[in-house]
Amino acid sequence: MRIGSGPSAQVAVREVEARRTPASMADVKAALTRALESQTGGRPNSRTVDVLAAQVSLETAHGGSMYNFNFGGIKGSSPNGESANYMTREVENGRSVTLQQGFRAYRSLDDGARDYISVIRTRFPQAYQQALAGNVDGFAHALKQSHYYTAAEDQYAAGLRAAAGMPSGAPTSAGSPAAIQALPEGLATSAELSRVLDAIASTSVRIADPESVD
C-alpha cells in the first residue's frame, strides 16, 4: 500500500545525492520535541517523544543509518521537492527483495523531524494518538492496522520496546501507558536489538507518496 503526504504539485522534484546523516538519539529527541512544539503549539509529553524516538531508532539503526535526515524511511520527495535514491529491503509477493528507490531528502535534522511529525499526524492519526498516550504497543498496533510495516506486529512492538530501553515483557495499555526509559548507547549494538532489527528489516515496508504507482 502506497501511503504518505506528497509535496505540493507546484514543487519540482529534484534528485540529490544520497548521504548518510547519522544523529545521536539525544539530538533526534530534541528535534522531535521542537517539531511537536511548532505543530501543536505546546510542550510535548516526554513519553510521546520517547515513543516516536523509538520508531526513529528502529527505522534508522539507532540513528546511525539515517540518510538525508529522513526519520522514518518516507519515500518520494520532501516538501521542498528533494529526493535521494538508495537501496532498501522490502517484501514483494512474500519474498524479501532489495530495491533502489527514491526517499525524501531534507537539508537539516529539524526539516526531517517536522515532516516526519506531519506525516504521522496526518496519515496515521490513530498511531499519533497512541504516541500521545505514551503507549508503545498501541502505537505498533495502529501502525500495523494502517499498513505502515509488514513485519509481524509482535516483532515490531518488541523492536520499539528494545529501542526505547523497555523490558520485553512490560505491559502497556492506552489507559495506563508504561514509563519509557532512555536507551543506553551501548544497547544499539546488543544482540537483542540487532536480532529484532534484522527481523524487521527483512520484512519492512516504507511510507510512500500517494502519487506513486506500484
Image (cartoon, rainbow, N blue to C red):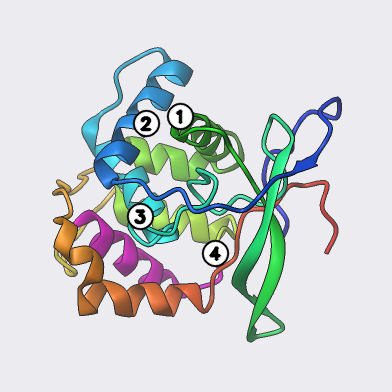
Q: Distance between the Cα atoms at labels 2 and 4?
A: 24 Å
Frontmost residue, 132 versus 186: 186
Which sits earlier in the primary sequence, circle 3 or circle 4? Answer: 3
Residue 150 lies in magenta, yes or no? Answer: yes
**Between marks 1 and 2, how big is the CA–CA gap?**
5 Å
Distance in Å between CA atoms under marks 4 and 1: 24 Å
- Under tag 1, what secondary structure? helix
Q: Residue at x 49, y 34 (%)?
A: 117
Q: Nearer the viewer, mark 2 or mark 4?
A: 2
Element on which disc 4 rests: loop
**Neighbours of disc 3 within 10 Å: few (<14), some (14-19), many (20+):** many
- Residue 72 in picture, x, y percent from top left: 51, 50
Magenta residues, start to end? 149-165
Q: Is there CB contact under 8 Å for labels 3 and 4?
A: no
Numbered disc in front, either 3 or 4 = 3
Residue found at x 39% / y 53%: 55
- Residue highlighted by disc 1: 110
